[in-house]
Amino acid sequence: AQSVTQPDIHITVSEGASLELRCNYSYGATPYLFWYVQSPGQGLQLLLKYFSGDTLVQGIKGFEAEFKRSQSSFNLRKPSVHWSDAAEYFCAVAAIQGAQKLVFGQGTRLTINP
Amino acid sequence: ETGVTQSPTHLIKTRGQQVTLRCSSQSGHNTVSWYQQALGQGPQFIFQYYREEENGRGNFPPRFSGLQFPNYSSELNVNALELDDSALYLCASSLGGGQVAYGYTFGSGTRLTVV
């Protein structure tokens, strides 16, 4: 069964600083990979996704993520964070075969210092 | 196009009671999935409905049940509520029988508190 680990429960960065959120997955084949963002009291918004092809994926709001098969990782990056990026970030994996459900990590809470 | 609408936004129930949560899917989407998000956790898959049939189920007991209607809206029913059922319940709609390649649109959720 697939699983996702987000090692960092909480990260604090200064506004304008760069950001990297870590995600490691477990799956026997190449999975579909996703990053979602959740603001307080809100649902999940898709930032970006990887299915195949170029391992560097661009998303909305200036985010990007890189799929590294050898490390089973799909880390999310942003070169310069804004105060509005403060939120909870979830990495998710989905199996390509069978009932396609999303399996989420525990999430990383991002706090931005002014 | 309209997004995914969930109702109610908040509710409080007593242990042992039953609850029904509702979801209106995004226009044109024929598949609905339900997720439970406990405080401080990532969402967990409960089940998915496609063409009014259950199309996959996560590790949840039978007291969690659902329905999908001909207009693709959906209900999540939970019987014999337990304190651990307190969570944010998220509904996601999609096309194509829930294939993730088509993308999921999430609602804002229903916050259920069991006391």
Image (cartoon, rainbow, N blue to C red):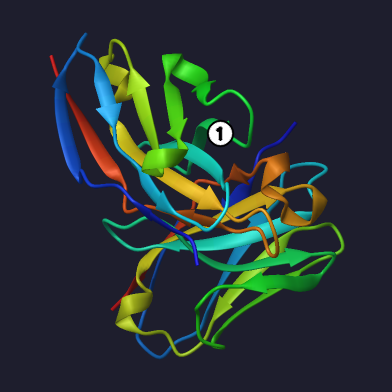
Name the one closer to the observer, A20 or A40: A20
Q: Quadrant of residue B10?
A: bottom left
Q: x, y (%) of residue B91?
A: 58, 55
Give the answer, above or below, for where A49 lies relative to A9: above
- Report the residue at 43% width, 14% height from top: A62
Residue at horizontal 36 percent and vertical 46 percent from the top: A24
Mark 1 residue crowding within 10 angstroms, few (<14) / some (14–19) / many (20+): many
| Count of marks placed on residues | 1
Chain identity of mark 1? A
Q: Amino acid at mark 1?
A: Lys
Badge 1 is on which residue? A49
Q: Is residue A6 left or right of residue A2?
A: left
Q: Position of residue A3 (x, y in %)?
A: 42, 59
Q: Is residue A34 above or below residue A48?
A: below
Q: Residue B66 versus residue A33: which sits nearer the camera?
A: A33
Counting from the top left corner in percent of width and height, residue B82 is at 36, 84
- Residue located 83% across and 43% down the image: B28
Where residue B4 sits: x, y (%)?
A: 64, 45
* Image height of B35 relative to A104, above or below: below
